[in-house]
Structures are given as C-alpha cells and as structure tokens.
Amino acid sequence: QVQLVESGGGLVQAGGSLRLSCAASGRTFSSYSMGWWRQAPGKEREFVAAINLSGGGTAYQVSVKGRFTISRDNAKNTVYLQMNSLKPEDTAVYYCNAARRSGDRWIADFGSWGQGTQVTVSS
C-alpha cells in the first residue's frame, strides 16, 4: 500500500551538512502533508519538521529551526530535509511519514515506517 525509503544519512563532523531524501510510493504523494521524525538511542521518536501539500507551509521543532529546511518535489514523489550546522545532538535515525497536526503535536499518518537513515554527528 505505501512504501517509504529514506536515504542520505551518514557520518559528519559538527557544523557539517547532510541532505536527506524520502521517496514515497503506493499512494498519491501530493495528497499528503509530509514530515520527518528522528529517534536517538534510548529515546522515543520525536518530530523534526513538516511540510504541507503544496510545499508553501512548513513547521519545525524548535531545536532545528534555522538549521534544517524541509522541502518536497511532488513530481518526484520525494521529500527532503536539508540539515546544516549539524550538532552531535542531531545524531539519530531519521524517518519520514505523512504528517498530520493534532493541536501542537504532529502525528504520523501512515501505518508503517521505512528503514530510516542514520545520521551521526561527531564532535
């Protein structure tokens, strides 16, 4: 029904940059707001950023605001996360999913997650 494939992670030094990609298939991509979540070792998955259907509206977790930029290319069925000025605390596995806002909380709408992509930031 839906498949999510994240890529672009890697090992980078503090202050460096990475660009993550999320390719979605099995559903009409342009019909969904999309988002990124991350999960660090020993911690629960947390919301990072979201983008609306057209790409004209975005939302970010406070800790990444000004450093990360979410974007989408509906023709390519892909959502991106440009991560600049990376910090060691950004180290986590990053996942994408459809994003739905419920109050001040962001909910992943697809029932399954992709494999995620590992981001490791060294100091």
Image (tube, grey):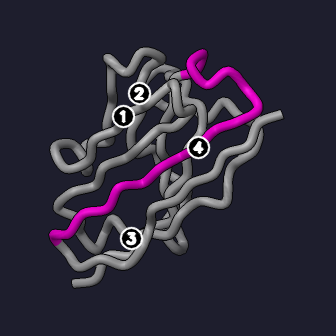
Per the rendering, the mark at residue 23 is: 4
Q: What residue range appears in magenta? A: 15-32
The secondary element bearing badge 2 is classed as: strand
The secondary element bearing badge 3 is classed as: loop
* Between 91 and 8, the one nearer to me in the picture: 8
> Which mark sits nearer the N-terminus, 1 or 2?
2
> Which mark sits nearer the N-terminus, 1 or 3?
1
Q: Residue at x 17, y 61 (%)?
A: 85
Task: Estimate the x, y position of residue 13 in percent, counting from the top left.
Answer: 23, 79
Q: Quadrant of residue 70?
A: top left
Which residue is the site of mark 3? 91
* Between 111 and 28, the one nearer to me in the picture: 28
Q: Are marks 1 and 2 in contact (CB under 8 Å)?
A: yes
Task: Give, as a three-letter code, the residue at label 1.
Answer: Ser
Q: Quadrant of residue 115?
A: bottom right
* Residue 123 is covered by the magenta coloring: no
User: Within 10 Å of the Cα at label 1, are there few (<14), some (14-19), or many (20+) other Cα atoms?
Assistant: many
Which residue is the site of mark 2? 51
